[in-house]
Image (spheres, rainbow, N blue to C red):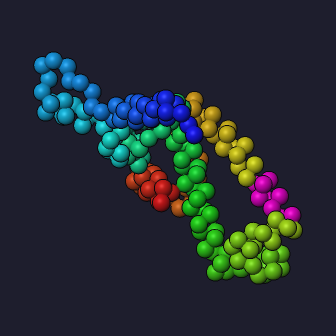
Amino acid sequence: GICIPILNMLRLSILVACVASATAFAPAALPFGLSTRAAAVSTKMQMSPSVPFLKKPSALDESLPGYTGFDPLGLSSLFDVKFLQEAEIKHCRVAMLAVAGSIVQDLVQDPSYAKITGGSKLTAAHDKLISTGTMGQILFWVSFAEVFGTIALFETLEGKRAPGDFKFDPLGFAKTDSKTWALKEIKNGRL
């Protein structure tokens, strides 16, 4: 068996680890002269609106479209916020296109596409395209988009363009109220 002193040492180590982790969540001591009510008001003002038990991210600008104060990992203090905003917009757009594409390809099929996939739907079509080697086209076009996306990212970081703004608005939605449409795009993409 395990000898008694080692078992006691193990128990003590576990107890110390638990106490140490609990102190991380304990409130800080109040400075002299401050009441608990005044301290509660000042700490509430600094808390994140989306995660109330975390501090408000200081690097995030509240004027950003879709601002909610959500940055639990503190990425906004590690990276340029314009870079993070550009990445979020890009991933939102890709996700929205992917959802639309998966729905459309289940409802409507091009006869030439049906010859390649054998009439397969969604994941079965993916597996069929991999086995026939036609996924190389997707890799090519995604790589093409990434190259131009990287050029656009450098322009964003230099302040020459707004994050996500490729001046592509064929229906003219953003001409009337660009802030409202930017907010709608972010919210829809976050779904």
Question: Does 21 sit left or right of 135 as displayed?
Answer: left
Q: Tell me the residue at 70%/46% (across/down).
A: 146
Residue 134 in the image, given as x and y percentages of width and height: 84, 64
Name, please, the residue furthest toward the right.
132
Viewed as shown, does residue 95 lie left or right of 9? right
Tell me residue 16's x, y (percent): 41, 30
Q: How many marks?
A: 0
Residue 161 visible in rendering? no
Residue 170 lies in quadrant: bottom right
Q: Position of residue 124 (x, y in %)?
A: 74, 74
Q: Residue at x 52, y 31 (%)?
A: 6
Q: Residue at x 32, y 41 (%)?
A: 53
Region of the chain picked out in magenta, as a range: 133-141
Q: Is 106 on the left or on the right of 41, as rendered?
A: right
| Whether residue 96 is visible | yes
Compared across the picture, whether 14 is left or right of 91 comes to left
Q: Residue 73 appears at what percent x and percent y?
A: 48, 38
* Front-most of residues 28 and 95: 28
**Picture quarter with the N terminus:** top right
Give the vertical position of 127 relative to 62 (above or below): below
Report if residue 66 lies within the magenta region: no
In magenta segment, residue 136: yes
Q: Residue at x 13, y 33 (%)?
A: 37
Dominant secondary structure of the magenta stretch? Answer: helix
Q: Nearer the viewer, residue 175 or 112?
A: 112
Q: Nearer the viewer, residue 142 or 133?
A: 133
